[in-house]
Image (cartoon, rainbow, N blue to C red):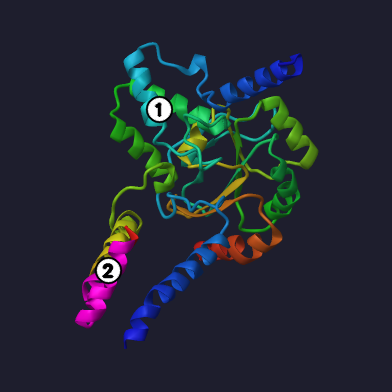
Amino acid sequence: MRRILYLLPLIAFIAVAAWFAAGLQRDPNRIPSALIDRPMPEFALPPVADAGVPGLAAADIRGQVSLINVFASWCVPCRAEAPILMRLAHQPGVKLYGIAYKDKPADNLKFLREFGNPYAAIGDDASGRTGIDWGVYGVPETFVIDRDGRIRHKEVGALTPKSLNETILPLIAQLSK
Amino acid sequence: MTLKHLIAGAVLAAGLGAGTAWGVLPDEMLKDPALEGRARALSKEIRCQVCQNENIDDSSAPLAADLRKLVRERIAAGDGDAQILEFLRQRYGDNVLMRPPVEPQTWILWFGPPALLLVAAGGLATMLRRRPAAPEPDLAPEDEKRARDLLERNT
């Protein structure tokens, strides 16, 4: 009995070390969003000049399941993500909108011309203030919005075929039922 | 001291200065020194979400600059410090606060280390109390006399 008591600190140490080791496997750059299951913030953004699609406001999005992708021409992972978004835009049942985050309209336009425009509408958030309301801290970020206008999922970083097939598309299918 | 030393010293001194440089840019500052002071103090409580181990007062990330501006706008608009922190917390979560709030979820974080210290101190105290006192040397009278003689001879 006494011997077990003496082993207690060692056992506690191993438990704590295992906990920390598990914590080290997690990506510290993925901060869970505080907005999950909360209504999306109100916003109304002007279009990107000459992009050929309208601007974006919260009111436009309600009533349907939609994806909002926060992107910028200066963002390198956005370039990796662009072809995936182009393919995604052609899938039935997917409504994809963009928020151009802290970008110059001319640069953004160049980006859209280079990679194509997958978005049904793009809001120009030049000041980044709407981004702050959405808790954006690293573009690209992608939000899944349900019919009631609530944020159901946030993906930080470029979308990958894996995250699309395993998370985003199943969630859209489930929310669209 | 050669010229080389002087140059090296100057470079080092410049580096030290840069280390303490602030993320805050002059054109961001509020005109009222009292309000600016509040903004600076509050900014130190807000974590930069891009660099994460820096507060927005120290960080040079663009998002930190935007948040500093936002803090100053809200202070100028008459918001209280708690209101501003809550505004950011609603958007970025507890992570945005440099000091995690004290709530059941964070009790282990706040009270864990002092509790552990108390447990360790308690354990040490009981251990010391339970340890039998050192036994009295069991010497025969003539041995004790010999010992005393030896000690006295040495001094």
Could you confirm whether marks 1 and 2 are on the same chain? yes
Name of the residue lying farthest toward the top: B31
Q: Which residue is mark 2?
A: B149
SS majority, magenta: helix
Camera-nearest residue between A40 and B71: B71
* Residue B29 against residue A106 in the figure, above or below: above
Q: Quadrant of the N terminus of chain A?
A: bottom left
User: Image quadrant of residue A27?
Assistant: bottom right
Which residue is located at x 42 percent, y 36 percent?
A: B46
Q: What residue range appears in magenta?
A: B126-153
**At label 1, which amino acid type do we have?**
Val
Mark 1 residue crowding within 10 angstroms, few (<14) / some (14–19) / many (20+): many
Q: Nearer the viewer, residue A121 or A22?
A: A22
Q: CA distance from mark 1 to mark 2?
A: 82 Å
Of tags 1 and 2, which is closer to the observer?
2
Q: Chain of mark 1?
A: B
Question: Residue A20: x, y in percent?
Answer: 50, 63
User: Which x, y percent locates residue A103?
Assistant: 64, 30
Query: Within 10 Å of the Cα at label 2, are there few (<14), some (14-19), or many (20+) other Cα atoms?
Result: few
Among the two numbered marks 1 and 2 on one chain, the one whose residue lies closer to the N terminus: 1
Instruction: From the top left corner, tell me how far across and down residue B50 is, in percent.
Output: 55, 40
Residue denoted by label 1 = B71
Above or below — where is B29 with respect to B79?
A: above
Left of B88 or right of it: where is A74? right
